[in-house]
Amino acid sequence: MLSRFMSGSIRNLEREYSCTVRLLDDTEYTCTIQRDAKGQYLFDLICHHLNLLEKDYFGIRYVDPDKQRHWLEFTKSIAKQMKSQPPFTMCLRVKFYPPEPASLKEEITRYLVFLQIKRDLYHGRLLCKTSDAAMLAAHILQAEIGDYEPGKHPEGYSSKFQFFPKHSEKLERRIADIHKTELIGQTPETSERNFLLKAQMLETYGVDPHPCKDVSGNPAFLAFTPFGFVVLQGNKRVHFLRWNEVTKLKFEGKTFHIYANQKEIILTYFAPTPEACKHLWKCGVENQAFYKLDKSSQVRTMSSSNLFFKGSRFRYSGRVAKEVMEQSAKIKREPPEIHRAGLVPSRSCPSITHGPRLSSVPRTRRRAVHISIMEGLESLRDSAHSTPVRSVSHGESFMPRSRSQATDASDGIAVISDEAYSPSDSVLPTPVAEHSMELAVSRQINGAPCSIEEEKESEAGTPPHGEGGGFAQEGAGGDSALSEVEQVNKFVLSVLRLLLVTIGLLFVLLLLLIILTESDLDIAFLSDIRQTPEFEQFHYEYFCPLRRWFACKLRWVGGLLINK
């Protein structure tokens, strides 16, 4: 707490801050911003640097010192949002996935979305069946190295690229076969467009997973997509609500509620921390407004509680999807040039592997993807998101009709993949301490176990947990005691808020009554009050002297203004 206060004091003394934004091709854009600069200013600088006009799909993400990720709010000061000390580090990411990315107007926009989905595939956020995965990877290969040439591409060349968190030799051979036979002659632009066409049909397209817990204490991932709200568990999508079916999003502490209009369904899940739950709620509010509304003028300020004096209030600021598409149709300019360089052999760098070898990641279009993540994350991620669970009522699942996926007809659950959904990078959008992560990876490579502190740093947002998947290494008694204390604190805060609001309302009513009684309104109720001795005493001893004092001050101020 003291360090935050001191860092805030230091920031107040500075007039300018250095800010670094990591772009989707892993290059960095560094600039200097004024102390009072708002998020919109920085975002416009980046879009100008990228020559990007269809910019409403993108956003700037950062991670606070508590390892909680946030989207930068464009209407607020950057310095007030950042809790860390300058220089600031953020990243550009796709915030709202286009419903049909292959139909975007400009190639530069499609290319940036292609890079984002490629990252989603690499980190396990875009999970799909083996056949779909092979086709996606083959399109990436065609876009980056072009047509297959026996002289340049020896046997096993596809194994030098890391497309997924893990893959088998059989999958590598399938990727190479598709690249050799089915994609010959496709330009990078065509391959990227076909990649987007394939990706948009997957159940996990557009998923930015939020780790939570359900009623049984099982891990689940909640996400907001262009088509609605989804819940992923294991290798299945257990719930799907279209945006026109979602009526309300609420949160209180760690508890997140989703209300649906069909049969009044209420889904309840539990986030790791209150901050994570608030971030989940804000993402839901923004996505619902972006995809559901017809005009930005329809956006309303949302409250996390039914009571106006309780909870958080948030309003989405920006255009909605329909307005964005209408504006994109009006773009008339020469397409900005995209420099596509041939494949440059990249140096070996650590990546997610499940064997003894390390895979190289290709560098194309002036980029070198060098995301380094510990192999130990795979064993940690499955049990890293848990919290004590209370009662919850789940309704029936909803199924999208626009996609052909294998489903279980008995309970309406869609199978999304042959493996369980477990994104390796779901809580690590922006490394906070990159040097510490590289140190942990190097120690892991050399066979040295990572310390607990290094594991916590590498997770960048995952609190310590025990074998049972909890957030703290305490017993059930400690968790229940902490839960009781939190409930007492919430009750006390609610009572204090209610008391303050009641006092405020009484004060406002008293002022209104005084104004009405001192006015010339001829109402029987007010006339009776004016004739009481108490009112006459208040009028002559307090109200009249106060009125003369205000009149004197107003004359004095008016005289000063006239003299000037």
Image (cartoon, rainbow, N blue to C red):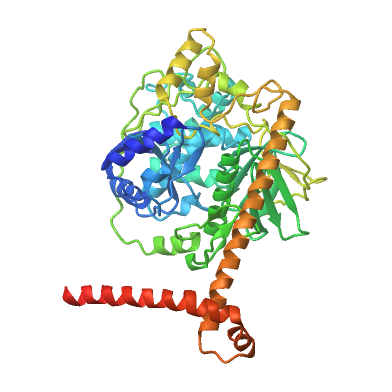
Residue 477 falls in which quadrant of the image? top right
Q: Where 425 falls versus 93 (above or below)?
A: above
- Residue shown at 48%/68% (left/top)? 297
Can you name the residue that lies furthest to the left here? 564
Answer with left or right where residue 106 lies relative to residue 354. Answer: left
In this orientation, does residue 45 appear? yes
Of residue 452 and residue 550, the one placed in the foreground of this image is 550
Q: Is residue 511 above or below residue 415?
A: below
Q: Is residue 190 visible?
A: no
List x then y, in percent, for residue 289.
54, 59
Residue 288 vertical placement versus 10 (above, below): below
> In front: 404, or 441?
441
Expressed as whole percent of the image width and height from the top left, the position of residue 139 reads 48, 37
Q: Seen from this angle, which residue lies furthest right?
A: 410
Question: For residue 288, which quarter of the picture?
Answer: bottom right
Give coordinates of residue 9: x percent, y percent. Answer: 35, 37
> On the picture, is 51 further left or further right than 279?
left
Where does the image place residue 47, in percent across and percent down from the top left? 33, 49
